[in-house]
Image (spheres, rainbow, N blue to C red):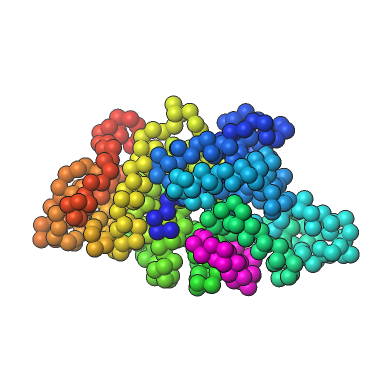
Amino acid sequence: MKKAVFYQIFPERFANGDPTNDPEGTEQWGGKPGLNNFFGGDLQGIIDHLEHLTSLGINAIYLNPVFEGTTNHKYDTKDYFKVDPHFGTNDKLKELVKACHERGIRVLLDAVFNHSGHTFEPFVDVMEKGASSAYADWFYVREWPLTVKDGVPTYDTFGFEPIMPKLNTANTEVKEYLLKVAKYWIEEVGVDGWRLDVANEVDHAFWREFRKTVKGVNPDAYILGEIMHEAVPWLLGDQFDAVMNYPFTKACLDFFAHDRIGANQLANRLAGQLTSYPSQVNEVAFNLLGSHDTARLLTLCEGRTERLKLATLFQFTFPGAPCIYYGDEIGMDGGHDPDCRKCMEWDPQKQNGDLLQFFKQTISLRHQYPALQDGALTFLQDQANDQNLIYERRDAQDRFVILINKSESSSVFRATIANEAWTDIVSGTPVTAEQGQLNFELPAFGYAILHAGSAENNQAPEFVRISSTELLRSGTL
């Protein structure tokens, strides 16, 4: 996992590879996303575009739910053992996983075990038979019959949404059913782990049994929980391997996108988080800057790709497994759901080629150097300028000092660093730190990646070099 670079795919909006399985009323690809419309994305579409992921440097994908449901997002599961017919078949998922494994890509599925959908057979039975149903205790019913009063269901749900009834995971039959699901897709299809939706609303006892079941089938399976806050109770070795690192997300957005905090506060917040968890947890944390539940990163950066680049550079040089939300690498924008779930843009003429190249280079850099995967991290705070972010990643072979100027004007960076032969990978020029004192100037929203390492380990990927003059001319700055 320390070497993982994730790519999140919302299946309905990634690519339509098989029009024959399109839902009735499917709209033309690239139209305006709504809460309830469909564009025909499917598993074949993902298979057709695996080369895009490979060329990008992706070695792990996280798929939003693929099991049968009535919505475009499929978080309302009807059948936990069946791929949604609009996405394909169980065999098609097997084909996708096999094709991914042949390319060295692991596959993570979304497990919606907090709640089911309203078309889930046991829930349908309860709706029909009421308290006499054999499945009555599978759900949390506060009042019979099951109905909605003044906008609130008489049974527990996810987010007061009537079509998503909450499952009673304390019920032995429910527990056995869901653990069978967890086991089935690993054994039968070969998926490499689970992302657990709304994990904080499911009891710890269930997750302990879940871990034993999953690790019993595949000890290397990755278990990722959706926890929005501090998550120590879930990360003690008996439940999850990692959580979606939203505290990291918020700190990064506050600094790179919203200008709410300075570099020192960013460093303090993230250093505090790192010291809250064991190193084994930090190394496999799921670090994201956006997802299907958030406005897109470019939109939060007010359309400024230079801010997005700085945030992405930081994400890929920070401890943990970075995740790209599909389309961020080509400059897709979008507000909150459903606008963040636009159809993937496959026309090269409408993609941001410079941004795509930046992502490829940054991912390649991370893959090349273990120091950027599990090396030690040290923040080298610049008290003279709170927009200057300076930090070091190092191991026995390589040292990196990364400088990020997140301001509208040029800035001089001052820090104490090792007396080494440094090279700026971005500009390709040597950098001298006289008597260990660095004085280095960067243009507005500029960055530098200073590297010191062994001779055989110094061929970093060449970065596209764009001067501040060119940025001004292009209107980016």
Residue 427 visible (yes or no):
yes
Q: Is residue 384 left or right of residue 360?
A: left
Which residue is depicted at the point 43% across and 70% down?
277
User: In the image, is 205 to the left or to the right of 256?
Assistant: right
Q: How many marks?
A: 0
Q: Mark yes or no: residue 300 visible.
A: no
Q: Nearer the viewer, residue 443 or 147?
A: 147
Q: In the image, is residue 135 part of the stretch drawn in magenta?
A: no
Outermost residue on the left side: it is 435
Residue beneath the point at 43% across and 61% down = 284
Residue closest to the far top: 349
Which residue appears at 43% of the width and 41% of the height?
A: 54
Q: Taking 5 as reference, is 340 above or below it?
A: above
> Over which residues does the magenta segment extend?
199-222
Residue 426 left/right relative to 281: left
Chief secondary structure of the magenta span? helix
| Residue 216 lies in the magenta stretch | yes
Q: Position of residue 398 (x, y in %)?
A: 23, 57
Q: Quadrant of the N terminus?
A: bottom left
Q: Residue 72 occupies which quadrant of the picture? A: top right
Residue at image coords 67%, 31%: 20
Q: Which x, y percent locates residue 75?
A: 66, 51
> Which quadrant is the C terminus positioned in?
top left
Residue 350, percent from left and from top:
46, 28
* Picture quadrant where residue 360 is located: top left
Where residue 377 appears, x then y in whole percent?
31, 63
